[in-house]
């Protein structure tokens, strides 16, 4: 009987195949725009972008785009791959001097290894010369 | 007939193939020495070589392991086993030309096994063994960044005290033998707050005894194995990316047995693709045993 109990105990231990103690990452990365702080600019200005992308565990990839919605053109288009927990994007874009009044859009996307995705779009109003 | 049965059982018993899929799992939580076909009460020295390959989303790993083991027969069908592995492994990053090499001893293990039940009649033999032990953190563990391509799951040692359990049932009939084994490795969190995933292994083997001459015997066997490696848990508490996997293996092996030694080899391949983020590839095992 003692032997049987031991075998049953061992078998029950075997059947416990649940992966306990670990957490599934269900939280999307976080995007924090450090610069610019004002979403208006003049034609000829330089737009300085500084963006902090972080994740609770590990990032997978991220994307940065700048769209001119008035002209329907894509002015910046950049993606990269990173396994870090946090990265800071630091880049700039020079607005043309002859630009008319325009609507731009900053587009940021990031995902982690578990497929959690965050997307952020911010409008930028550019006062043109005309 | 009984003699033939005992010979075939004896021959297979010295072969240490069954759970070598567990022996090297591509991380520090290796289940060294679990589930050997024990030697029916005799003491022996064992040496084995295993080669395994794994592929993850970021890297490709190749492990070579040499293991030296000693098995001592105790009273009342108890046996004591101690093992010390040596690991040489290389991880190749898939996105770059970088690679990292491990070259050191692994985690030593100590276990006891007991024949808890056996039955012999005119041409059949049944045996049931239970085994339990632990694995000590003798291998080195590097506390590397979680986000590194050479993440903490690629180690020679686990840096944790881990528990080993196995069950083995053997049935022999005439010139044939059937062996079922099930083994489990329960890993614990190490001092770096990293925990390797637990492992489950099941193995079914069918062997046939082939006599070479009066001094030499041999065994030809086929096997079907299933291996499940749970995901690791990193120091942030999340499952580590690129760990955990499941695979089925078919295998074929051959062993030659003399009075004082035996030599065997086995090749295992995957009949269906592996699952998970850390996928096992084909593997090979070679072993040489000396009976005391």
Image: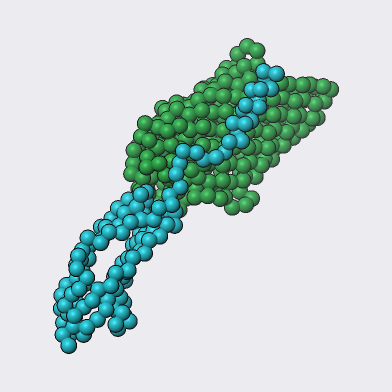
Chain colours: A cyan, B green
Q: Residue at x 48, y 43 (%)?
A: B231
Query: What is the quadrant of the C terminus of chain A in the image?
Result: bottom left
Residue B17 spot, x, y in % from top left: 61, 34
Relative placement, left or right, of A124 versus B191 is: left
Residue A28 spot, x, y in % from top left: 39, 56
Q: Residue at x 50, y 45 (%)?
A: B244
**Most extreme residue toward the top, as rendered?**
B75
Does residue B192 appear anywhere in the picture?
Answer: yes
Does residue B35 appear anywhere in the picture?
Answer: no
Q: Residue at x 45, y 32 (%)?
A: B188
Relative placement, left or right, of B260 versus B178 is: left
Residues A42 and B152: in front is A42
Q: Residue at x 62, y 26 (%)?
A: A9
Instruction: Please say if B66 is above or below B77.
Output: below
Residue B251 spot, x, y in % from top left: 64, 42
Residues A107 and B287: in front is A107
Query: What is the quadrant of the N terminus of chain A in the image?
Result: top right
| Res B10 quadrant in image | top right
Relative placement, left or right, of B76 versus A38 is: right
Number of numbered discs present? Answer: 0
Residue B147 spot, x, y in % from top left: 35, 48
**Most extreme residue toward the bottom, as rendered?**
A130
């Amino acid at each position: 009987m003692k032997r049987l109990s031991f075998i049953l105990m061992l078998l029950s231990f075997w059947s416990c195949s649940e992966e306990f103690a670990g957490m599934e990452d269900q939280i999307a990365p976080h995007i924090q725009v450090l610069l610019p702080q004002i979403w208006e600019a003049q034609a000829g200005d330089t737009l300085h972008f500084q963006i902090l992308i972080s994740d609770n565990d590990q990032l997978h990839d991220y994307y940065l785009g700048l769209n001119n919605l008035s002209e329907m053109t894509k002015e910046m288009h950049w993606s990269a791959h990173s396994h870090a927990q946090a990265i800071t994007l630091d880049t700039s874009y020079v607005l043309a001097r002859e630009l008319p009044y325009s609507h731009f859009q900053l587009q940021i996307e990031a995902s982690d290894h578990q497929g959690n995705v965050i997307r952020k779009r911010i409008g930028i109003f550019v006062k043109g010369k005309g | 007939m009984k003699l033939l049965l005992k010979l075939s059982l004896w021959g297979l018993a010295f072969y240490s193939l069954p759970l070598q899929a567990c022996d090297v799992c591509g991380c520090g939580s290796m289940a060294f020495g679990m589930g050997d076909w024990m030697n029916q009460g005799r003491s022996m020295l064992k040496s084995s070589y295993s080669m395994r390959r794994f592929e993850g989303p970021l890297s490709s790993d190749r492990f070579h392991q040499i293991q030296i083991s000693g098995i001592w027969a105790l009273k009342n069908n108890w046996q004591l086993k101690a093992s010390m592995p040596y690991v040489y492994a290389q991880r190749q990053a898939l996105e770059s030309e970088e690679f990292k090499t491990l070259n050191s001893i692994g985690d030593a293990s100590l276990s006891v096994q007991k024949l808890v039940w056996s039955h012999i009649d005119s041409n059949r033999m049944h045996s049931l063994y239970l085994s339990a032990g632990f694995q000590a953190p003798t291998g080195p563990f590097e506390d590397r960044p979680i986000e590194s391509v050479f993440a903490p799951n690629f180690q020679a040692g686990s840096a944790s005290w881990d528990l080993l359990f196995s069950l083995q049932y053997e049935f022999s009939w005439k010139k044939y033998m059937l062996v079922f084994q099930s083994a489990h490795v329960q890993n614990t969190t190490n001092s770096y707050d990293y925990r390797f995933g637990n492992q489950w292994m099941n193995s079914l083997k069918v062997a046939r005894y082939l006599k070479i001459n009066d001094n030499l015997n041999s065994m030809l066997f086929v096997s079907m194995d299933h291996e499940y490696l749970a995901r690791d848990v990193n120091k942030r508490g999340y499952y580590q990316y690129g760990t955990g996997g499941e695979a089925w293996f078919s295998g074929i092996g051959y062993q030659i047995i003399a009075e004082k030694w035996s030599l065997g080899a086995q090749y295992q391949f995957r009949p269906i693709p592996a699952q998970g983020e850390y996928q096992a590839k084909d593997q090979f095992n070679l072993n040489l045993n000396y009976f005391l």
